[in-house]
Image (cartoon, rainbow, N blue to C red):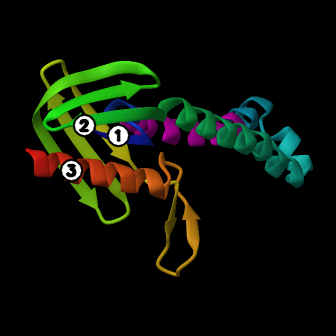
């Protein structure tokens, strides 16, 4: 029996992050433009610095909401693999169990790992993106859509390769 533990998102969480984060990033700009419109620019025409200050609380709220959404969507998974049988727990609750019917894996270097597993009792999709990645210049860069650490991605990749070899 092999046991794998990792943090990952699902296809649903990937969809929520893809649609939700751009909306959250646009909120500070919308609030500032509404302030400009309803005050008719009187506040910002007298004090140019106040236009910049209006954006700062919005940016702090944006960063806070991005972290909260990402932390809420990422779950802890435990996968037990016995031959061709699999048991998957999501935050301590059993989600999928039984013999593996189908497994599809897609790994794009160190940017994305996607594993779709089908069983008798259901199916689940794991999506793992790195929280930080190396830019072309060699520096580490923050990924707002990142859900997993590099060790979680390696664990998920080894799980996918093991399931592929079993099937």
* Residue 127 at x, y percent in the picture: 34, 43
Main secondary structure along the magenta-highlighted residues:
helix
- CA–CA distance in space, label 1 to label 3: 11 Å
Q: Are marks 3 and 2 in contact (CB under 8 Å)?
A: yes
Q: Is residue 5 above or below residue 157?
A: above
Which contiguous range is marked in magenta?
14-33
Quarter of the rendering occupied by the N terminus? top left
| Nearest to the observer: residue 164 or residue 134 | 164
- CA–CA distance in space, label 2 to label 1: 6 Å
Mark 3, Cα crowd under 10 Å, few <14 / some 14-19 / many 20+, is some
Residue occupied by mark 1: 3
Q: Is residue 161 left or right of residue 48?
A: left
Q: Is residue 109 above or below residue 76?
A: below
Q: Are marks 2 and 1 in contact (CB under 8 Å)?
A: yes
**Residue 119 found in image quarter:** top left
* Residue 48 at x, y percent in the picture: 86, 54
Q: Is residue 156 left or right of residue 57?
A: left
Residue occupied by mark 3: 162
**Residue 19 found in image quarter:** top left
Q: Is residue 18 left or right of residue 87?
A: right
Disc marking residue 35:
none
* Residue 2 at x, y percent in the picture: 30, 42
Furthest-bottom residue in this view: 137
Residue 16 on the magenta segment? yes
Q: Nearer the viewer, mark 1 or mark 3?
A: 1
Residue occupied by mark 2: 81
Q: In what element is the residue under mark 3?
A: helix
Give the residue displayed 24% in from the left and 37% down from the top. Answer: 81
Which is nearer the N-term, disc 3 or disc 2?
2
Residue 49 on the magenta segment? no
Quarter of the rendering occupied by the C terminus? top left
* Residue 84 at x, y percent in the picture: 13, 36
């Amino acid at each position: 029996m092999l046991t794998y533990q990792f943090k990952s998102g699902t296809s649903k969480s990937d969809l929520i992050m893809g649609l939700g984060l751009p909306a959250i990033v646009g909120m500070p700009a919308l609030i500032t433009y509404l302030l400009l419109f309803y005050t008719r620019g009187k506040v910002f025409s007298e004090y140019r610095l106040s236009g910049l200050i209006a954006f700062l609380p919005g940016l702090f709220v944006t960063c806070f909401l991005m972290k909260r959404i990402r932390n809420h969507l990422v779950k802890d998974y435990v996968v037990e693999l016995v031959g061709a049988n699999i048991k998957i727990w999501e935050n301590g609750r059993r989600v999928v169990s039984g013999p593996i019917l189908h497994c599809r894996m897609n790994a794009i270097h160190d940017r994305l790992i996607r594993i779709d597993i089908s069983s008798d009792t259901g199916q689940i999709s794991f999506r793992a993106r790195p929280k930080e990645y190396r830019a072309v210049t060699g520096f580490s860069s923050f990924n707002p859509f990142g859900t997993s650490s590099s060790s979680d991605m390696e664990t998920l990749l080894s799980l996918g390769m093991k399931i592929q070899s079993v099937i």
